[in-house]
Image (tube, rainbow, N blue to C red):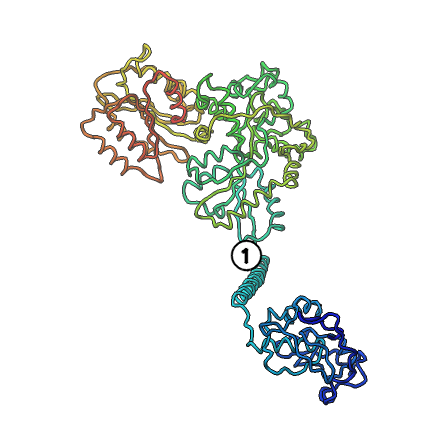
């Protein structure tokens, strides 16, 4: 056994084959044929560039750098070659050695696979697998004559190839191929998905960055008291806003009063107001309540306060001491008493002369109205019962060129004798007062402020996100993003510098207001109550024209008096609370006929030498209840015809029917009355028929239909001897 061979099962490990011959195996011309040198293997190649050659032989990947066939073209030295040792059961033999090859009983070569792998010249796992143990690769039949093979790595490789070819080519497992194909497919899919996803993402981002679809205009309407500041926010937002989809956002701000916005949603949006908005910033949440009452709750998708500003009175500094013990509830009397300020230490100043401007003043007038109503309503009564005090206050306000805040403040700041000034005080917000004070050379000497005690009405300036078919999803998203932008600390800090209150931000210094702390804010009820009160307050200044149509046949006794007596007492109280410029008339009817008692006209107009208001209350007090029926249907037909002929432009025209039924008309029934109203109603001269109906009136369905057809309201009461009657009159007689 050669010194490099491993023994077979039958070999004697002590056997020594003797020294290796130096050239015996190549004496038959093998060296000449294959280019081996006789001088032994020096361990160097004949050609220097041999090491750079690579093989692409049959199934071999050229890792060891051998040429096709498993042999190098250059000579190997004999000594080096023999040093490799045989792995396959061959003994090292000289030229004349004819010892039989050892094999197992099965005819396979008796090689130890483990030793083969260990003694193989390949260090890596892949080469070991490919050279492989014979048991795994398969042997070959020893009956066939096997040529002598040179030893070493070259022989191992060639021998392994013969082992494979003797029993046929060994196929690769189908499962392995399927697994490889699956892995390649999955990896390829992931690579392609990431590549195309990344590419499309970049394309989308590039398109968005380039605004491929052009610009996106987002209309914003804001109350004039804050619109300039909102415009500044919009300019900063437009410079930094990211595109929405692939369109560049442009927020456009337009100053619009709350009345115009609410009116625009009732009918067609006025063209002069620009595009119908995606975002609205009114003076307060009372405007939101008004909008939802006419356009529905679904019109508003979100509403939250941006900044706040308390409502107070801008006053002449001289009034500060005189008003120390007053409150919101005492203002109506101070406004109407000709010498109200005299007893308060200001002789010769006359009444308060408080202006309640609407234009450019946010919702300050409406918020002050809520405070006055809440302070004036009887204890336990709804706040709407105090609306009469509001009308009294507003009806006696100074007559100015217009109803703007700017005009009211200009008159307040006139030089000269302040006692003779047409305006002594102006309802406004703290922020508006601060702004005007900043423009004065001597603010402390010309302008002051007074915050009445008690719960404080506050303008909360909400950002109102609107919803409707006129908006695209991109506009909705952009409007929402702008609202969030406006609430960022740096934007709120800018609004705080302008005099708005921002939580956690110190207000600026001012000579006209100290920004006093607000201990409690005014709350008058839910949105429905606020909307009802606000709608009644839209008649401030006496913009209503109403004719009362009173049923004299209400003879039912309630609380020791007839139902008619209770109604008359409530009407007297309500008329006294109406502004002097309100137009009011009176008709009555019984079982015989309907008639006009006092013609319609402003309450402060003279009728027979006295104000119409006094004439009305006098005529009412003279009425008494009578039985015998009620010709209510024909009376309404006559009155409605006259009201159309005497329609008052610029005022809310209405008729207030107060009855208990049933009607006793012979020439006009319920369907006939409804047909008449349906045909007579003129949208250009709308006259609403409002109805207060007592008890279980058989004509209830007719009155409900008449009210609906004319745009009025119907209210059924069980009794006239209850606070409900006063509340109904406050709402319907305004």
Total numbered labels placed on residues in the image: 1
**Foreground: 444 or 237?**
237
Which residue in the protein does label 1 denote? 246
**Foreground: 494 or 112?**
112
Where does the image place residue 630, in percent across and percent down from the top left?
23, 22
Where does the image place residue 596, in percent across and percent down from the top left?
30, 24
Q: Is residue 541 visible?
A: no
Vertical placement of 352 versus 477: above or below?
above
Residue drawn at point x = 51 percent, y = 23 percent: 372
666 sits to left or right of 292: left
Q: Residue furthest top?
A: 560
Where does the image place residue 566, in percent across and percent down from the top left?
34, 15
Dot 1 falls on a residue whose secondary structure is loop
**Foreground: 339 or 160?**
160
Where does the image place residue 515, in percent across and percent down from the top left?
65, 28
**Foreground: 196 or 712?**
196
């Amino acid at each position: 056994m050669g010194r490099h061979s491993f023994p077979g099962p039958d070999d004697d490990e002590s056997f020594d084959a003797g020294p290796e011959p130096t050239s015996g195996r190549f004496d038959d011309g093998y060296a000449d044929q294959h280019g081996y040198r006789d001088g032994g293997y020096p361990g160097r190649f004949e050609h220097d560039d041999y090491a750079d050659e690579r093989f692409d032989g049959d199934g071999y990947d050229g890792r060891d750098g051998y040429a096709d066939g498993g042999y190098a073209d250059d000579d190997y030295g004999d000594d080096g070659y023999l040093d490799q040792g045989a792995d396959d059961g061959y003994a090292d033999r000289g030229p004349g050695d004819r010892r039989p090859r050892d094999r197992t009983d099965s005819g396979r070569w008796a090689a130890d696979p483990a030793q083969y792998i260990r003694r193989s010249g390949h260090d890596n796992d892949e080469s070991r697998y490919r050279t492989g143990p014979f048991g795994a690769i398969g042997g070959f039949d020893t009956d066939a004559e096997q040529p002598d093979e040179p030893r070493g790595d070259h022989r191992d490789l060639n021998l392994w190839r013969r082992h494979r070819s003797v029993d046929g080519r060994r196929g690769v497992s189908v499962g392995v191929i399927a697994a490889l194909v699956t892995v390649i497919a999955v990896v390829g899919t992931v690579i392609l998905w990431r590549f195309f996803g990344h590419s499309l993402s970049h394309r989308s981002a590039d398109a968005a960055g380039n605004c491929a679809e052009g610009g996106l205009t987002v209309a914003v309407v804001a109350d004039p008291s804050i619109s300039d500041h909102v415009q500044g926010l919009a300019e900063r937002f437009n410079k930094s806003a990211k595109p929405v989809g692939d369109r560049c956002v442009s927020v456009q701000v337009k100053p619009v009063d709350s009345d115009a916005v609410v009116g625009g949603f009732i009918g067609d949006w006025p063209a002069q107001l620009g595009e119908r908005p995606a975002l609205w910033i009114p003076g307060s949440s009372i405007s939101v309540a008004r909008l939802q009452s006419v356009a529905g709750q679904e019109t508003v998708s979100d509403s939250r306060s941006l900044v706040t500003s308390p409502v107070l009175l801008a006053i002449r500094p001289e009034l500060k001491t005189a008003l120390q013990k007053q409150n919101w509830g005492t203002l109506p009397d101070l406004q109407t008493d000709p010498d109200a300020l005299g007893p308060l230490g200001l002789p010769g100043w006359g009444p308060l002369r408080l202006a309640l401007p609407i234009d450019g003043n946010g919702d300050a007038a409406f918020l002050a109205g809520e405070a006055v109503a809440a302070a004036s309503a009887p204890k336990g009564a709804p706040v709407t019962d105090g609306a009469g005090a509001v009308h009294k206050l507003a009806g006696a306000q100074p007559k100015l060129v217009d109803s703007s805040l700017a005009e009211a403040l200009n008159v307040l700041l006139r030089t000269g004798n302040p006692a003779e000034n047409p305006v002594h005080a102006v309802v406004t917000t703290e922020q508006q007062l601060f702004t005007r004070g900043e423009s004065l050379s001597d603010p402390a000497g010309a302008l002051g402020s007074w915050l009445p005690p008690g719960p404080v009405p506050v303008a909360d300036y909400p950002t109102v996100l609107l919803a409707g078919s006129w908006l695209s999803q991109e506009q909705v998203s952009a409007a929402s993003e702008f609202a969030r932008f406006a609430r960022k600390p740096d934007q709120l800090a800018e609004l705080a510098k302008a005099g708005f209150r921002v939580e956690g931000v110190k207000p600026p210094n001012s000579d006209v207001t100290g920004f006093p702390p607000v201990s409690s804010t005014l709350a008058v009820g839910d949105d429905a109550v606020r909307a009802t009160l606000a709608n009644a307050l839209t008649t401030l200044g006496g913009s209503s024209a109403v004719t009362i149509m009173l049923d004299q046949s209400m003879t039912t006794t309630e609380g020791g008096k007839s139902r008619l007596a209770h109604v008359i007492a409530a009407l007297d109280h309500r008329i006294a609370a109406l502004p002097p410029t309100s137009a009011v008339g009176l008709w009555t009817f019984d079982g015989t006929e309907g008639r006009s008692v006092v013609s319609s006209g402003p309450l402060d107009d003279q009728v027979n030498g006295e104000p119409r208001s006094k004439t009305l209350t006098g005529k009412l007090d003279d009425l008494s209840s009578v039985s015998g029926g009620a010709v209510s249907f024909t009376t309404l037909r006559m009155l409605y015809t006259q009201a159309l002929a005497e329609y008052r432009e610029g005022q809310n025209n209405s008729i207030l029917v107060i009855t208990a039924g049933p009607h006793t008309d012979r020439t006009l029934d319920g369907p006939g009355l409804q047909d008449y109203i349906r045909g007579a109603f003129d949208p250009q001269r709308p006259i609403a028929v409002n109805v207060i109906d007592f008890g279980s009136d058989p004509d209830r369905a007719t009155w409900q239909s008449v009210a609906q057809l004319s745009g009025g309201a119907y209210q059924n009461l069980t009794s006239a001897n209850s606070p409900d009657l006063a509340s109904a009159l406050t709402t319907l007689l305004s």
